Image (cartoon, helix red, strand yellow):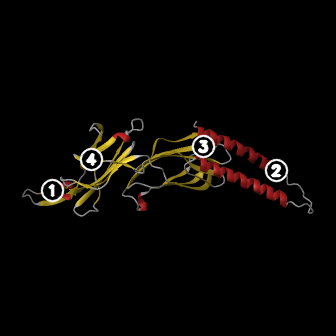
């Protein structure tokens, strides 16, 4: 268990103790209070105590997690994440504010709602739960997601509508702090390719480029050589990442389909590439990216 979670459990146990004290005041039969007795002081004290507990809980959530939200009973928090804003892995923790364990047989209702393709902000959105996507630990639910987009995403949002068999509304948003990366902007090459942008970080990267239509479109002809049709097929991609001495740090290859035609006479492509968590790209050593034979110098971002 991480030190952060240990700290969280310590605070939760303290809050549980405070909660027990409050419940003892109000349990059992309501005593008959003479009309002459002023109960306003007691009411204000209880209200103040509850407010103090809520305030401590909110402060603890904000201090312990990258982002958190609660509805007075349940909370949702960003437990852990990696992001270069092209690719993000994130774990959400869901639990009870009073520290009572949630039912380990129940799966919360809800999930990632942004980035989303129907928002109109992205040309591509791929989202999924990755590996052991959800589990139960320390009395709370954990759900793991990954997402990659074109263009990059600045914010992620989640919505959960049922936790521990109870309807709720937990809307959690956060802006990830991106890891260091190397980038390049627009460049034109003699072979006709136009680079829009390139980014590579230790776990992922993306190259966005344009090819002239004559290189991207396959034409069909009849026996007389007349064009009878055409289609936009996938193109091959060969990518190498080099260090400052020209040594090859990694090589990737694949095929990618067009992602739009927003530049007249050209077809647009976005090639995503990824690195294993246990064998990340040594970003500080990266100097040059070679895309289909075209050399692209990279600079550190942010500089």
Residue marked by disc 3: 140
Q: Mark 2 vs mark 1: which is more N-terminal?
A: 2
Q: CA distance from mark 1 to mark 4?
A: 21 Å
Which quadrant holds residue 186? bottom left
Q: Label 2's element?
A: helix
Q: Residue at x 42, y 60 (%)?
A: 118
- Residue 255 image label: 4
Question: What is the x, y in percent for residue 108?
Answer: 56, 49
Q: CA distance from mark 4 to mark 2?
A: 68 Å
Q: Residue at x 66, y 50 (%)?
A: 57
1 vs 4, front mark:
4
Question: What is the x, y in percent for residue 40?
Answer: 84, 61
Crowd around label 1: few <14 · some 14–19 · many ≥20 (10 Å): few
Residue marked by disc 1: 220
2 vs 1, front mark:
2
Q: Mark 3 vs mark 4: which is more N-terminal?
A: 3
Residue marked by disc 2: 25
Whether the residues at callouts 2 and 1 have beta carbons within 8 Å, the answer is no
Q: Is residue 255 above or below residue 228?
A: above
1 vs 3, front mark:
3
Crowd around label 4: few <14 · some 14–19 · many ≥20 (10 Å): few
Q: Is residue 182 above or below residue 250?
A: below
Q: CA distance from mark 1 to mark 3?
A: 59 Å
Whether the residues at callouts 1 and 4 have beta carbons within 8 Å, the answer is no
- Residue 120 image label: none
Q: Mark 1 vs mark 4: which is more N-terminal?
A: 1
Whether the residues at callouts 1 and 3 have beta carbons within 8 Å, the answer is no
Along the line of sight, which residue is nearer the eye, 234 or 174?
174
Q: Residue at x 8, y 56 (%)?
A: 223
């Amino acid at each position: 268990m991480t030190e952060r979670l240990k700290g969280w459990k310590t605070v939760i146990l303290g809050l549980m103790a405070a909660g027990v004290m409050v419940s003892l005041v109000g349990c059992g039969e309501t005593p008959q209070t003479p009309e002459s007795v002023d109960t306003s002081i007691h009411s204000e004290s209880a209200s103040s105590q509850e407010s103090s507990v809520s305030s401590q809980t909110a402060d603890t959530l904000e201090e312990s997690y990258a982002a958190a939200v609660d509805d007075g009973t349940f909370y949702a928090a960003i437990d852990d994440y990696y992001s270069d804003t092209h690719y993000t892995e994130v774990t959400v923790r869901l639990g009870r504010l009073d520290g009572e364990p949630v039912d380990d047989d129940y799966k919360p209702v809800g999930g990632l709602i942004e980035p989303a393709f129907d928002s109109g902000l992205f040309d591509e959105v791929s989202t999924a739960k990755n590996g052991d996507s959800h589990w139960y630990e320390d009395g709370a639910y954990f759900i793991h997601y990954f997402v990659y987009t074109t263009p990059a995403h600045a914010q992620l949002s989640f919505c959960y509508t049922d936790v521990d068999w109870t309807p709720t509304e937990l809307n959690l948003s956060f802006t990830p702090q991106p890891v260091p990366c190397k980038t390049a902007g627009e460049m034109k090459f003699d072979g006709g390719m136009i680079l829009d942008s390139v980014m590579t970080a230790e776990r992922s990267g993306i190259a966005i480029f344009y090819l002239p239509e004559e290189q991207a479109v396959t034409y069909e002809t009849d026996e007389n050589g007349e064009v009878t049709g055409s289609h936009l097929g996938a193109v091959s991609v060969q990518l190498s990442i080099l260090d400052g001495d020209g040594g090859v740090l990694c090589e990737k290859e694949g095929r990618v389909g067009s992602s739009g035609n927003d530049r007249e006479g050209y077809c647009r492509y976005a090639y995503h590439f990824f690195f294993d968590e246990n064998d990340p790209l040594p970003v500080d050593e990266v100097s040059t990216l070679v895309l289909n034979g075209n050399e692209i110098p990279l600079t550190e971002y942010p500089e």
